[in-house]
Image (cartoon, rainbow, N blue to C red):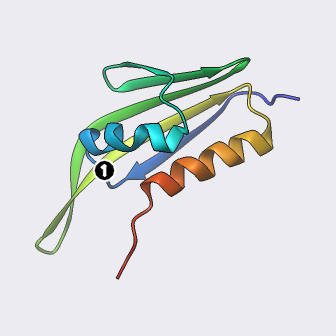
Amino acid sequence: MSGGPVTITKDMGVTHAEFFRLLPRALGSEAYSRDGARVVLEDGNRRLEITLGPEGRRQIALLRLPRTAVTLSFIGYSDDDRAAALALFERAFQRAGG
């Protein structure tokens, strides 16, 4: 059973270039369409729409880090499918600390 649309917004520490470089791994597919800062992945009755906000910077003392708001809209995903897709997405953008 598919759930209703669910939208999640994330404040991510990536540039647009880095986001699009990692995107195939984050989606587990290269079968998506891109129109500027918007991506659509369709899989049967499921649809994932991703929209990137403008690039910004986060300043911490003398350190400047990239910052981009990313909105993911899951349409037709069950709770379990959405959780799995989100876990894959988050793992692809995870950075190791040291």
Residue drawn at (79%, 45%) of the image: 80
Q: Position of residue 35 (x, y in %)?
A: 36, 17
Most extreme residue toward the left is 62
Residue 17: quarter of image: top left
Q: Position of residue 78 (x, y in %)?
A: 79, 35
Q: Is residue 21 left or right of residue 1?
A: left
Q: How many marks?
A: 1
Q: In the rendered view, would you say 76 is above or below 93?
A: above
Q: Amino acid at mark 1?
A: Val
Q: In the rendered view, would you say 48 is above or below 44?
A: below
Most extreme residue toward the bottom is 98
Q: Position of residue 77 (x, y in %)?
A: 74, 31
| Position of the N terminus by quadrant | top right
Q: Residues within 10 Å of mark 1 (few under 14, many from 20)?
A: some
User: SS of the residue at dot 1?
Assistant: loop
Q: Is residue 52 left or right of residue 32?
A: left
Q: Position of residue 93 (x, y in %)?
A: 43, 54
Q: Is residue 19 left or right of residue 4?
A: left
Q: In the rendered view, would you say 28 is above or below 93?
A: above
Residue drawn at (58%, 31%) of the image: 73
Name the foreground residue: 33 vs 36: 33
| Position of the C terminus by quadrant | bottom left
Task: Quickly name the residue at label 1.
Answer: 14
